[in-house]
């Protein structure tokens, strides 16, 4: 995916713990500070979207993990240079 067409996401009930098995992607980051969502929160999906541009991007590569708390807006699955296959594990940890 391309960051120009994607949006930031956030969750309320779960912390995302992600581990990259193979491949690499970029992940955009921004702290939640009252931004207005473009897609309102869905309790059933524990998901909402934000149109804001990430403050910065991190490289998420094989053998590393990332943790996203409810205060972390994040934009995963962004291609590094070209589209590539990735394999990762996502564990949801309930916080509410």
Image: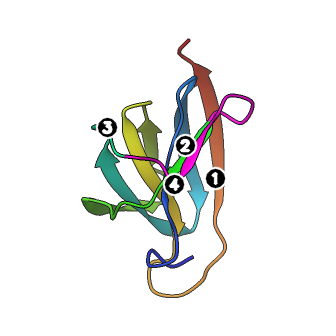
- The residue drawn where x is 56% and y is 44% is 48
How many angstroms separate mark 4 from mark 3 (CA)? 13 Å
Using residue 63 as the reference point, say whether residue 84 is left or right of it: right
Q: Is residue 37 magenta?
A: yes
Q: Which residue is mark 1?
A: 88
Q: Is residue 54 magenta?
A: no
Residue 40 pos. (x, y %): 57, 42
Q: Are marks 2 and 3 in contact (CB under 8 Å)?
A: no
Q: Which residue is mark 3?
A: 34
Q: Which residue is mark 4?
A: 38
Q: Residues within 10 Å of mark 3 (few under 14, many from 20)?
A: few
Q: Which residue is mark 2?
A: 18
Q: Are marks 4 and 3 in contact (CB under 8 Å)?
A: no
Q: Secondary structure at mark 3?
A: loop
On residue 52, the disc is: none
Tell us which disc is closer to us: 4 or 2.
4
- The stretch of residues the image draws in magenta is 36-46
Tell us which disc is closer to us: 1 or 3.
3
Q: Is residue 58 above or below residue 90?
A: below
Tell us which disc is closer to us: 1 or 4.
4
- Determine the residue located farthest toward the bottom in the rendered image: 82
Q: Are marks 1 and 2 in contact (CB under 8 Å)?
A: yes
How many angstroms separate mark 1 from mark 3 (CA)? 30 Å
Q: Residues within 10 Å of mark 4 (few under 14, many from 20)?
A: some
The quarter of the picture where residue 67 lies is: top left
Residue 56 pos. (x, y %): 26, 61
How many angstroms separate mark 1 from mark 2 (CA)? 7 Å
Q: Secondary structure at mark 1?
A: strand
- The residue drawn where x is 68% and y is 28% is 43
How many angstroms separate mark 1 from mark 4 (CA)? 27 Å
Q: Secondary structure at mark 4?
A: loop
């Amino acid at each position: 995916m391309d960051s120009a067409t994607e949006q930031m996401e956030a969750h309320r009930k779960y912390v995302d713990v992600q581990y990259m098995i193979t491949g690499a992607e970029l992940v955009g980051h921004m702290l939640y500070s009252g931004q207005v969502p473009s897609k309102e929160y869905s309790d059933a999906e524990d998901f909402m979207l934000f149109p804001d541009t990430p403050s910065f991007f991190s490289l998420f590569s094989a053998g590393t993990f990332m943790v996203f708390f409810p205060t972390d807006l994040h934009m995963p699955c962004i291609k590094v240079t070209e589209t590539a296959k990735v394999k990762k594990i996502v564990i949801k940890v309930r916080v509410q």
